[in-house]
Image (tube, rainbow, N blue to C red):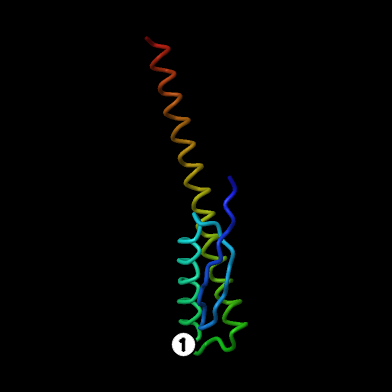
Amino acid sequence: MNIKPQQVSLMIMGKEYRIACDLEDQDELIYSAQQLDLQMKRMRDSGKVAGPDRIAVMAALNLAHELQILKTENARLNKKLIDCFDKLSLKLENVLEKN
């Protein structure tokens, strides 16, 4: 049974945005919008970035950069985990061969 996406109302920089979203993803979407709103308001209030379009682009760039850092770290940790599993597997094979 397919469940129709629900409309979620999000407030970002004082503007309302209605977004269609699956029910199970709504909490994450709302949290993401709150984080974006917070970051954009901080930029606006700092006075270093002027104009809502520029603030939105800078906030998007910052979030994309954070995401890329996390993806890189995740890939590094995944490789490290695979290496550990490979070493453990080799040790187990050696122990089993000796018995």
Q: Residues within 10 Å of mark 1 (few under 14, many from 20)?
A: few
Q: Is residue 14 left or right of residue 95?
A: right
33 vs 52, left or right, is left
Q: Position of residue 95 (x, y in %)?
A: 38, 17
Label 1 sits on residue:
45
Mark 1 element type = helix
Residue at horizontal 42 percent and vertical 18 percent from the top: 94
Residue positioned most to the front:
1
Rendering quarter of residue 22:
bottom right
Kind of residue sitting beneath label 1: Asp
Q: Position of residue 59 (x, y in %)?
A: 55, 75
Residue 95 drawn above or below residue 8:
above
Q: Is residue 45 above or below residue 7?
A: below
Q: Which image quadrant: the N terminus?
A: top right
Residue 11 vs residue 86, the one in the foreground = 11
x, y percent for residue 33: 50, 70
- The residue at the point 50 percent across, 90 percent down is 47
